[in-house]
Image: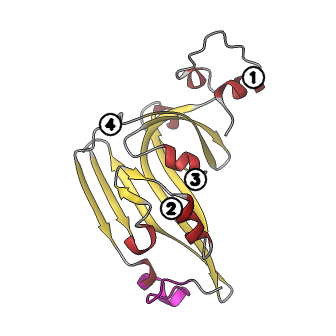
């Protein structure tokens, strides 16, 4: 991920202060918003058919301070230490990537993502490092590139979590006809 200084240098903007704060947002090179969802998406092929689904889809309702969603503990138990600490370790990625193509999605909401100046949201893919660096309730400064978010800066815990309603489900059982074995949680190669 390029540093803020590199982005500014590439765009020809000179900076004389060491504190960049949210200056990239102010000059239009980045957008700022609150992290509203984190999703781990898995893709696989079985008998010539391509499948995609999410064993982890957790969201944050800022107006109620509520974290809600669902996950499969058999697949992402190592990823979700708590609803406010969702991190994909190298070991978890290694286990998942032997069976699936793994992608990370985040939703960010804020005035920078609206057309009318009120509140808007954007769902974009991100790299594992950026996915791990932000958590639900954080405010982040991001650069939007095509279908991706690059995290520039994170302001931790800018929103307060008041309650949690996260449920579990059985991803393998849901996809047993799609090549996922419920007994062994195996993806046939």
Residue 125 visible: no
Q: Mark 4 vs mark 1: which is more N-terminal? A: 1
Mark identifier at residue 9: 1
> In front here: 50 or 127?
127
Q: Which residues are magenta?
A: 173-186
Mark identifier at residue 159: 4
Farthest residue, direction left: 162
Pointers 2 and 3 in contact (C-beta within 8 Å)? no
Q: Is residue 182 above or below residue 76?
A: below
Residue matched to label 2: 40
Mark identifier at residue 42: none
Pointers 3 and 1 in contact (C-beta within 8 Å)? no
Q: Is residue 49 above or below residue 120?
A: below
The image quadrant where one finds the C terminus is: bottom right
Q: Is residue 75 above or below residue 106?
A: below
Q: Main secondary structure of the magenta part?
A: loop
- Cα distance in 3D space between marks 3 and 1: 25 Å
Give residue 177's position: percent from left, percent from top: 51, 90
Q: How is the image coloured?
A: secondary structure
Task: Judge the density around disc 3: few (<14), some (14-19), many (≥20) Cα neighbours within 10 Å.
Answer: some
Residue 189 visible: yes
Q: Nearer the viewer, mark 2 or mark 3?
A: 3
Give residue 185's position: percent from left, percent from top: 48, 83
Image quadrant where residue 81 sits: bottom left
- Cα distance in 3D space between marks 4 and 1: 32 Å
Mark identifier at residue 128: 3
Image quadrant where residue 168 sits: bottom left
- Name the side, left or right, on which 8 lies relative to 38: right
Residue 175 magenta? yes
Give residue 15's position: percent from left, percent from top: 67, 13
Residue at screen point 45% across, 82% down: 172
């Amino acid at each position: 991920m390029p540093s803020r200084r590199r982005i500014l240098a590439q765009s020809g903007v000179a900076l004389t202060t060491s504190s960049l704060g949210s200056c990239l947002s102010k000059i239009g090179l980045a957008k700022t918003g609150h992290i509203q969802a984190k999703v781990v998406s898995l893709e696989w092929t079985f008998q010539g058919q391509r499948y995609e689904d999410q064993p982890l889809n957790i969201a944050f309702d800022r107006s109620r301070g509520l974290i809600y969603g669902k996950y499969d503990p058999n697949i992402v138990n190592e990823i979700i230490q708590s609803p406010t600490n969702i991190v994909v370790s190298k070991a978890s990625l290694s286990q998942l990537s032997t069976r699936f193509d793994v992608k990370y999605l985040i939703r960010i909401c804020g005035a920078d993502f609206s057309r009318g100046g009120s509140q808007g949201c954007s769902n974009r893919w991100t790299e594992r490092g950026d996915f791990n660096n932000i958590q639900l309730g954080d405010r982040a400064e991001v650069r939007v590139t095509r279908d991706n978010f690059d995290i520039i800066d994170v302001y931790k815990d800018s929103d307060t979590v008041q309650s949690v309603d996260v449920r579990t489900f059985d991803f393998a059982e849901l996809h047993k006809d799609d090549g996922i074995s419920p007994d062994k949680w195996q993806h046939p190669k």
